[in-house]
Amino acid sequence: MRYLIISDLHSNLESLSAALEYRDYDAALVLGDIVGYGANPNEVTEIVRDLGALLIIRGNHDRVAAGLDQGELFSQAAYLAAMWTRQMLTPENRLWLQRLPIGPADLNGQLTIAHGSPLDEDEYLFDPAEARPQFSAFSTPICFVGHTHIPGIFALGKDGEIAFEQPRASDSFDLDLSRYRFLINPGSVGQPRDGDPRGSFAVYDTARSQIEFHRYPYAVEVAQRKIMDAGLPPFLARRLAAGR
Ligand code: ZN
């Protein structure tokens, strides 16, 4: 099986459309934050609804935009965008987002997905110290997480050491499942933050035990113009070009 793993789409229709030109996968897994920040919440939600994904969980932005949480902990820009999104969502899309399950979710004991971390959907995993306690919160060999918008792999060895690797652009890694367990972030489709403005997703090939990170260009300036035209915070447009 080849699983397409997408996260943090953030209402970015241009980037999601470019990502889905990639077809070499059998099933999709969606790690949440389908909406928030960008200007096309309904279009992006509808594409995800039609994707027939094997597993989908919500993210913190979906929770706030769907009205399940008031977003008190959000930054100003995130809050304004979430409230704008809440107003824009059709009743059907809002209900669909409200009903998304909270991670972690497990696929046949083979892999787990979570938004922030398996312990907490709002938690950011940036370094090995933050990753360490997570490994006892899931039982599968691999857990995929999003939320930081930064692609990377945490590998816990049998000796208890945790290594962290970041892909350089498009890159693939062999996963030695007999010696390591993994927490893997596919990066963000809709708002990359690792200094590379290109969109990011991952493909997990179970037959090869390989993870592929894919970076792809998309029409950043179109997504930016829509954010400005919608009256969303200009910072949200600027950061797309910077990839930060
Ligand atoms: Zn996000």
Image (cartoon, rainbow, N blue to C red):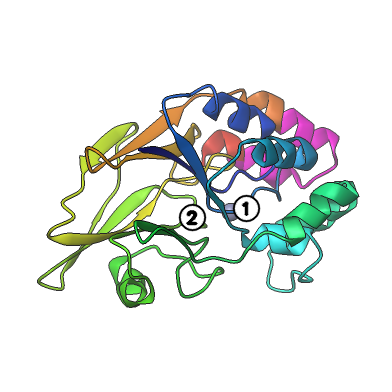
Q: Viewer-proximal residue, 206 or 77? A: 206
Left or right, 58 with respect to 106, comes to right
Q: Quadrant of the N terminus?
A: top left
Report the image quarter containing ligand 1. Answer: bottom right
Sequence order check, earlier mark of 2 and 1: 1
Q: Position of residue 95 (x, y in %)?
A: 81, 56
**Label 2, label 1: how far apart the Cα atoms are:** 9 Å
Q: Mark 1 points at which residue?
A: 33
Q: Does the beta carbon of the residue at mark 1 sit less than 8 Å from ligand 1?
A: yes
Q: Which residue is drawn at 50% across and 34% down?
A: 197
Examine the rendering and report whether any part of residue 186 can be seen. Answer: yes
Q: In this view, does 113 lie to the left or right of 236?
A: left
Residue at point 68% right, 32% down?
13
From the viewer's side, name the closer residue of 153 and 150: 153
Secondary structure at numbered mark 1: loop
In this rendering, position of residue 15 left or right of residue 69: left
Highlighted magenta segment, given as a residue range:
224-239
Q: Crowdedness of circle 2 by 10 Å Cα count: few (<14), some, many (20+)? A: many
Q: Which mark is residue 4?
A: none
Q: Is residue 85 visible?
A: no
Circle 2 is placed at which residue position? 146
Secondary structure at badge 2 equals loop
Which amino acid is tagged 2? Gly
- The residue depicted at 35 percent of the width and 54 percent of the height is 184
**CB atoms at circles 2 and 1 under 8 Å apart?**
yes
User: Relative to residue 233, is residue 23 depicted above or below?
Assistant: above
Measured along the vertical axis of the image, is residue 25 above or below residue 111?
Answer: above
* Residue behind label 2 places its C-beta within 8 angstroms of ligand 1: yes
